[in-house]
Amino acid sequence: MANYYDLRGPSTRLGWWPNGFGGPVQEGGPSANTPVLEYSSGGTDVKVHGTDLTVSHSPAGTFITAIVKKLTHGLVGTGATSFSFLVPDVQQLDPGQCVSIHAVGILAVHRGSGIHASGQLQTYTDVSLAGTAATIKMRD
């Protein structure tokens, strides 16, 4: 099973570590086996883990959602930006081996419930992703 995904799309780069970075654990960082997403797009560079990351498994693959930007402007619930993507399952990789994959991403801008206007609360931009899935040696 792959333990690292390197994906790119228009103006977007993702590093997905479904089983975390391994050790040693850095202060303020994720624990050794916690999933981590490194997201870079349009001047936003974040490392997402913990409660800002949701992982769901389905017959279609693994669906990951990360809060990549929080907007509060002093008010709770006034919006955020999330990035979600669906990656295929990848199995039977030897250590050091990688395979090409394609994935689908969705950038969602959440208007937030603190803004009192009717209409949809999210707007979406689809992002086509391509890259590799690999089994790499983790840090000790």
Image (cartoon, rainbow, N blue to C red):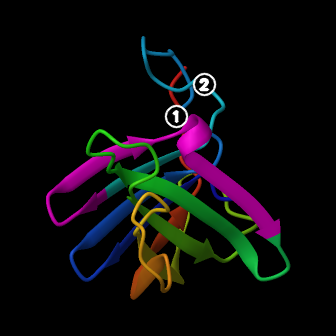
Whether residue 95 is visible here, answered yes or no, is no
**Residue sitting nearer the eye, 67 or 15:** 67
In primary-sequence order, the first of circles 2 and 1 is 1
Picture coordinates of residue 68, whole percent (x, y): 38, 54
- Image quadrant for the C terminus? top right
Residue linked to disc 2: 32
State the count of labels: 2
Picture coordinates of residue 12, whole percent (x, y): 28, 71
In the picture shown, does residue 53 fall above or below 24?
below
In the picture shown, does residue 21 fall above or below 39?
above
Whether residue 6 is visible here, answered yes or no, is yes
**Residue sitting nearer the eye, 65 or 116:** 116
**Residue sitting nearer the eye, 62 or 124:** 124
Query: Would you say 68 lies left or right of 40 here?
Result: right
Residue at (53% x, 69% y) in the render = 84
Residue at (85% x, 79% y) in the render = 59
Dominant SS type (magenta): strand
Residue at (21% x, 76% y) in the render = 11
Residue at (53% x, 47% y) in the render = 136
Q: CA distance from mark 2 to mark 1?
A: 6 Å
Query: Would you say 111 lies left or right of 63 here?
Result: left
Task: Tell me the kind of residue under disc 2.
Answer: Ala
Residue linked to disc 1: 21
- Image quadrant for the N terminus? bottom right
Query: Magenta segment range?
Result: 40-57
Give neighbour class at mark 1: few <14, some 14-19, many 20+ (Cα, 10 Å): many
Residue sitting at the far top: 27
Dot 2 lies on which element? loop
Residue 41 located within the stretch drawn in magenta: yes
Do residues under tags 2 and 1 come within 8 Å of each other at their CB atoms? yes
Rendering quarter of residue 117: bottom left
